[in-house]
Image: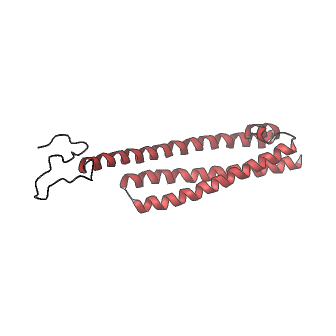
């Protein structure tokens, strides 16, 4: 089964690269959180570009992984969709199979960490946007189309109130 062995080595190598890319993403997410806290727009932009590059790399790895699993499935006369990493590890067996299972578990843990870090950053952005909206609603009237003062400089009786401030006087 030399073709299977070569496929498993390529798959292992690909998964190791994917794992490395996910590990590179984690500090970027932490740096992004810090840039959000310090409101550093330039830093956020730089981090955004780095993240996009890593996401593109990860998409490429995923596509390559699907192709490798499809090739292995064809070698084993199985349906392409039925072959998972766990099934490939079982079919390959031995030390290589154990390594596939180990790196599969590592990938799951890394994806969970990336998901958690991203959710935290998303939460910070959402809270910041909510606070900004509330601050803007306090400062500006509900309807900006109405005039606040008459031509003589006196307050209009029908002037709109600020959204969060309901008392006049």
Residue 19 placed where, x, y %?
64, 49
> Horizontal placement of 134 versus 118: left or right?
left
- Among all residues in the image, which is located at the extreme front? 151
Q: Could you say which is closer to the camera, residue 82 or residue 109?
A: 82
Q: Could you say which is closer to the camera, residue 149 or residue 46?
A: 149
Residue 132 placed where, x, y %?
33, 49
The C terminus, quarter of image: top left
Up the image or down, 167 lies above or below 15; here it is: above
> Horizontal placement of 113 versus 123: left or right?
right
Q: Which scheme is used to colour this image of the protein?
A: secondary structure
**Who's the residue at 13% across and 51% down the image?**
155
Q: Could you say which is closer to the camera, residue 121 or residue 129?
A: 129
Find residue 60 and report its image quarter.
bottom right
Residue 51 placed where, x, y %?
54, 56
**Who's the residue at 27% across and 49% down the image?**
143
Up the image or down, 82 lies above or below 31; here it is: above
**Who's the residue at 59% across and 50% down the image?**
22
- Among all residues in the image, which is located at the extreme right? 1
Residue 158 placed where, x, y %?
18, 46
Q: How many marks?
A: 0
**Who's the residue at 77% across and 46% down the image?**
69
> Horizontal placement of 77 versus 29: left or right?
right
Up the image or down, 49 lies above or below 9; here it is: below
Q: Could you say which is closer to the camera, residue 133 or residue 43?
A: 133
């Amino acid at each position: 089964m030399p073709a299977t062995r070569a496929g498993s080595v390529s798959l292992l190598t690909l998964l190791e690269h994917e794992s490395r890319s996910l590990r590179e993403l984690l500090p970027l997410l932490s740096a992004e959180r810090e840039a959000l806290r310090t409101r550093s727009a330039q830093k956020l932009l730089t981090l955004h570009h780095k993240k996009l590059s890593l996401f593109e790399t990860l998409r490429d790895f995923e596509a390559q992984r699907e192709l490798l699993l499809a090739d292995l499935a064809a070698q084993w006369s199985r349906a392409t969709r039925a072959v998972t990493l766990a099934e490939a590890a079982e079919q390959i067996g031995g030390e290589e199979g154990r390594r596939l299972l180990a790196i599969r578990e590592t990938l799951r843990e890394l994806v969970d960490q990336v998901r958690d870090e991203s959710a935290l950053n998303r939460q910070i952005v959402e809270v910041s946007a909510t606070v900004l909206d509330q601050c803007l609603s306090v400062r500006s009237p509900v309807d900006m189309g109405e005039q606040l003062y008459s031509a003589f400089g006196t307050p209009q009786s029908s002037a709109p109130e600020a959204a969060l401030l309901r008392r006049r006087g």
